[in-house]
Amino acid sequence: MAADDTFLNDRPSGRGSSARNSWTRATPGKDTTQIVLTVIAGLGAAVALVVAYRRQRDAELARFDERFAAAAAQLGAPTAAERLAGVYAMAALADTWEKHRQQCIDVLCGYLRLPYDPTNALLTTVVSEHTWPIGTATGKETRTYEQLPNDREVRLTIISTITRHLRDPAPISWQGKNFDFTGATFDGGDFSRATFTGGQITFNEAKFTGGRVTFDQARFAGGRVTFVGAKFTGGRVTFDQARFAGGVTFVGAEFTGGRVTFDGAQFTGGRVTFGWLTFTGGLVTRDGAEFRGWPPPEPDLGPEPVGPPAGLRANSGAV
């Protein structure tokens, strides 16, 4: 009986077992270790994600740089076929990489700004002269460039590619981007139904020398479009049924040949400026009525003369 009593006394009671379990569950060292391991695992996963993102970004940038260099090299190739391939390759890059879109557009516009003589498709040397006043004297700079042969088709393809991305609805729109055609020579090109909204569109000192350049049904809304000092010397340039509702300026434009028409054009808002124009030849009309100042006459104004005689500058205003 004594032995049985001893055995019973040695068995843990239910209350003691419960206390030991509570002590085990409340062990602070074990909980801290679990927390630390969890935090370390989370940090490791975050670091892995950052590293993977950077690797992917670097790989994408490397792919872009490689394709960009290849497209640029094609644009400078000696044959027209290779240069045409370069145009399409550069446009595809602009469509694929949105954050590099402006860079690709700048290259295409830069090609159009290269010296170009449309009088001879096979001419290989172009001389560019630039003069500026120095006190009472005149400074002059002359540069000679090598022009690539059969270049007109390449230039027209660039224009059509840009226009296609500025029309509504374009699968991938380039509206709102900057387009710099400063000093470019145009002997043709179709900008019809393009929407110039947002961004800066620059035709300053551009030369319209021949062929037909059309802005028919184009929409100028928002942003800034400038034809400052543009020279219209030949061919035909049409703004028929164009809508001007943003900032557009033709200040200092020279009309010395060819024909420029604004038939059916609408001026509904914004600021359109035609000041200090020079008329020494050619013909500028709106709805069949000739004008040499601004605003141009409406078709029903009658035969009364509008603006100064040919050869004088019209310092007029804005709509």
Image (spheres, rainbow, N blue to C red):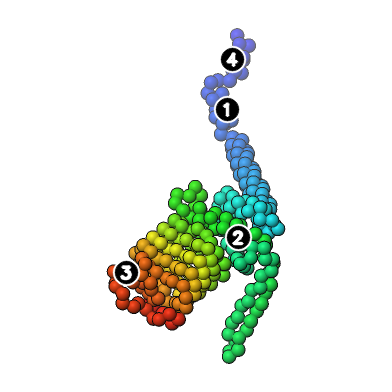
Residue carrying label 2: 152
- The crowd level at tag 1 (other Cα within 10 Å; few <14, some 14-19, many 20+) is few
Q: Secondary structure at mark 4?
A: helix
Residue carrying label 4: 8
Residue carrying label 1: 20
The answer to whether the residue labelled 2 contacts the one labelled 3, judged by CB atoms less than 8 Å apart, is no
Separation of disc 4 and disc 1 at Cα? 19 Å
Q: Is residue 135 visible?
A: yes
- The crowd level at tag 2 (other Cα within 10 Å; few <14, some 14-19, many 20+) is some
Q: Which mark is residue 309?
A: none
Q: Position of residue 200 (x, y in %)?
A: 49, 65
Q: Secondary structure at mark 2?
A: helix
Q: Residue sitting at 53 percent across and 23 percent down? A: 15
Dot placed on the residue nearer the N-terminal end, 3 or 4: 4
Q: From the viewer's side, name the closer residue of 213 and 235.
A: 235
Q: Residue sitting at 60 percent across and 86 percent down? A: 138
Separation of disc 2 and disc 3 at Cα? 37 Å
| Image quarter of the C terminus | bottom left
Type of residue at label 3? Glu
Q: Is residue 196 visible?
A: no
Which callout, 4 or 1, points to the residue nearer the camera?
1
Separation of disc 2 and disc 4 at Cα? 109 Å
Type of residue at label 1? Arg
Q: Position of residue 72 (x, y in %)?
A: 66, 57
Dot placed on the residue nearer the N-terminal end, 2 or 4: 4
Q: Is residue 250 above or below residue 68?
A: below
Residue carrying label 3: 298
Q: Residue sitting at 50 percent across and 53 percent down? A: 164
